[in-house]
């Protein structure tokens, strides 16, 4: 059985109100141990949540956050430029360079640089 939003909220309220439980949850090193601890808390407070349901919820949340990044997201994270950015900078850079050289050549031909 999947955990309903109501059950999740109840569990969150118990964790928020029980400092010892919150401290113990921060020290666990596996999702199985955290699920077991939360299932025990749920059972003590009459909340219908099994360790398997809680573990399945953890795994679904992890899977949702493990999605692969797109090329644009990877470029943004890496601080690099996207292909479109590279094209834009190349065209602009080349264009500015051509203008600079053309203007410089025209000035030299006109004899203004003597």
Image (tube, rainbow, N blue to C red):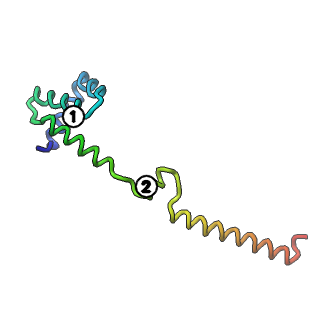
Q: Nearer the viewer, residue 87 or 45?
A: 87
Q: Residue 51 placed where, x, y %?
A: 15, 34
x and y, in percent, of residue 35 in the image: 20, 33
- Residue hosting label 2: 73
Q: Could you tell me which secondary element the residue under label 2 belongs to?
A: helix
Residue at the extreme right: 114
Q: Is residue 23 left or right of residue 79?
A: left
Between 58 and 97, the one nearer to me in the picture: 58
Number of marks in the rendered image = 2
| Extreme residue toward the top, this view | 20
Q: Residues within 10 Å of mark 1 (few under 14, many from 20)?
A: some
Name the image quarter holding residue 61: top left
The answer to which quarter of the image holds residue 38 is top left
Residue depicted at 23% across the width and 30% down the height: 33
Relative vertical location of residue 73 with respect to residue 31 in this rendering, above or below:
below
Image side of residue 22 versus residue 43, left or right = right
Earlier along the polypeptide chain: callout 1 or callout 2? 1
Residue under label 1, please give it.
12
Label 1 with label 2: CB-CB less than 8 Å: no
Q: Nearer the viewer, residue 63 or 95?
A: 63
Q: Quadrant of the C terminus?
A: bottom right
Tag 1 secondary structure: helix
Direction from residue 89 to residue 44 in the image, left or right: left
Q: Label 2: how many residues lie within 10 Å, few (<14), some (14-19) or many (20+)?
A: few
Say which mark, if any, is on residue 112. Answer: none
- Residue 36, horizontal then vertical, whole percent: 18, 30
| Image point (86%, 78%), residue name | 110
Q: Is residue 17 above or below residue 64?
A: above
Q: Quadrant of residue 7?
A: top left
Q: Nearer the viewer, mark 1 or mark 2?
A: 2
Q: Is residue 1 left or right of residue 59?
A: left
**Placement of the N terminus among the 4 image quadrants:** top left
């Amino acid at each position: 059985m999947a955990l309903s939003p109501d059950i999740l909220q109840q569990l969150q309220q118990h964790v928020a109100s029980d400092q010892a439980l919150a401290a113990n949850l921060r020290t666990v090193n596996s999702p199985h141990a955290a699920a077991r601890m939360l299932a025990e808390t749920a059972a003590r407070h009459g909340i219908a949540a099994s360790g398997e349901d809680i573990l399945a919820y953890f795994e679904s949340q992890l899977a949702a956050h493990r999605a692969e990044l797109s090329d644009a997201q990877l470029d943004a994270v890496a601080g690099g430029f996207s292909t479109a950015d590279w094209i834009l900078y190349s065209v602009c850079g080349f264009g500015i360079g051509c203008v600079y050289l053309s203007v410089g050549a025209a000035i030299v031909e006109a004899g203004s640089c003597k």
